[in-house]
Amino acid sequence: MGALSRSRSEPREPPARGAPQFFSDPLDRRPARVPYPAVGLLLGTALAVALAWPARAQSPEASVARADTAGLRVHLVTIGPGEQVWERFGHNAIRISDPVSGLDLSYNWGMFSFDQPGFLGRLLRGTMLYWMAPFETEGMVSAYAAADRSVWVQELALTRVQREELRALLALNALPENRFYRYDYYRDNCSTRVRDALDRVLDGRLRTALAGIATGTTHRWHTRRLLRHMPAMYTGSQLVLSGKADRPIDRWEEAFLPIELMEALRDLRVIDEAGVERPLVREERELYRSREVTEPPVPPSGLLWYLAGGLALGAAVVALARADAPSRVALALLGAGWSMAAGVGGAVLLGAWLFTDHAFWYPNWNLLQLNPLSVVLVILLLPLLVRRRPGASAVGLAAAIGVLSLLGLLVHLVPGIEQRNGEILALTVPIHLGLAVALVRLAVRSEVAPAA
């Protein structure tokens, strides 16, 4: 989430699932076997690019020794979006400070390492390992301000017992044997870890207040909103996200976004030491405001742009269905290029479904648009480079792929099908149908026209 940190250390594997879970994953409340999805291979790869931290990480042992005081203060630190794709979703951390002793550490769950054994394999399988570490708050905030990212801090009105419990929990979580967790972009990320830690010391009061409160949003809605100014990443995410990303989410689930968690805490009331109900947020300050980057409030309305692109490419393919050599070669190259892109994309989606933990990728109706069979069509189109007439196999396969693409459009209209892939349909259906029509037309014209 926008604050991933490069590290040259070699993280150790977390203990096996049979090990005591409080030590291997102290905030883990999930069943033993849960898929760990990612937004998509393209997006996931971009998210694996780190923002280097100028701040120096503190040892957990040192933080425990320095924090043995009654003057602890707890803040939620929230960082706004940045310009890069891995920064678009923001970041957050829990700050533990004591003005008397000088302690001031921010615990952040956004750490990973390119040097991690099996890094690429884990990225592809959706089993990325992240870890948590404390950093000096001043250096951390300075780094984000230098990157022109907004920073807010909220002091939380926790009781002394809750502050001590939270400090102990975070210090324990930061120990080498406890700090790792399997990253899930929507369900288990840097922000949900912060949320769960606060909920634990609040005895579940945060979850009680947020769970079941409708937001009118989905994971896809927020993804589209935050990637609206990045067309390539936006399109890639819409291709790989299945209908699971279109399930309505409540305020508890929406806290996978740091800014949404920050806003949710503003509405929460807790019981203080005197037994009086009061707001959880004692004070909120904006430490730095970005000069350039703000969160888009709503997703884009891009359906017409995708439809225009699909119709333009589909019409271009049909227009090339002529027997002259330049048109025929152009048709072969354009059709093969599109079919290769669609086929490889379909193979990635199918492979993710069958062999990975990218649960938000499947079941994905975009497989009717990114069809692995399109790779075969690439081979069948190549003879058009030297022959006037497309083969019957090429015509038949293009027609079948076009029918399946059209079927995907009809499925989209069926009530109960949640996957909102209208933009992808608007782009792909005209191209698939255009290629099928072009090959049929060229085959007919080749039979009628005399040989040159």
Image (spheres, rainbow, N blue to C red):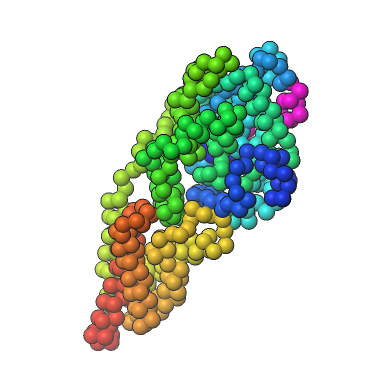
The answer to whether one can see residue 166 in this image is yes
Q: Is residue 51 above or below residue 452?
A: above
Which quarter of the image is occupied by the N terminus? top right
Q: Is residue 72 above or below residue 130?
A: above
Q: Residue at x 49, y 18 (%)?
A: 278
Quick one: 295 or 389, which is closer to the camera? 295
Q: Residue at x 71, y 33 (%)?
A: 172
Q: Which residues are magenta?
A: 51-66
Q: Residue at x 34, y 56 (%)?
A: 416
Left-right relation of 7 to 289:
right
Q: Is residue 347 above or below residue 426?
A: below
How many numbered badges does the structure rendering display? 0
Taking the view exactly as shown, the residue that stands out farthest to the front is 275
Q: Is residue 204 above or below residue 21?
A: above
Residue 309, given in percent of the width and then of the height, sits at: 31, 56
The quarter of the displayed image where residue 77 is located: top right
Residue 159, given in percent of the width and then of the height, sits at: 60, 19
Magenta stretch contains residue 192:
no
Residue 412, given in percent of the width and then of the height, sits at: 32, 59
Quick one: 379 or 385, which is closer to the camera? 379
Quick one: 364 or 250, which is closer to the camera? 250
Magenta stretch contains residue 64:
yes
Taking the view exactly as shown, the residue that stands out farthest to the left is 448
The quarter of the displayed image where residue 142 is located: top right
Q: Residue at x 42, y 70 (%)?
A: 374
Residue 65, given in percent of the width and then of the height, sits at: 76, 23
Which quarter of the image is occupied by the C terminus? bottom left
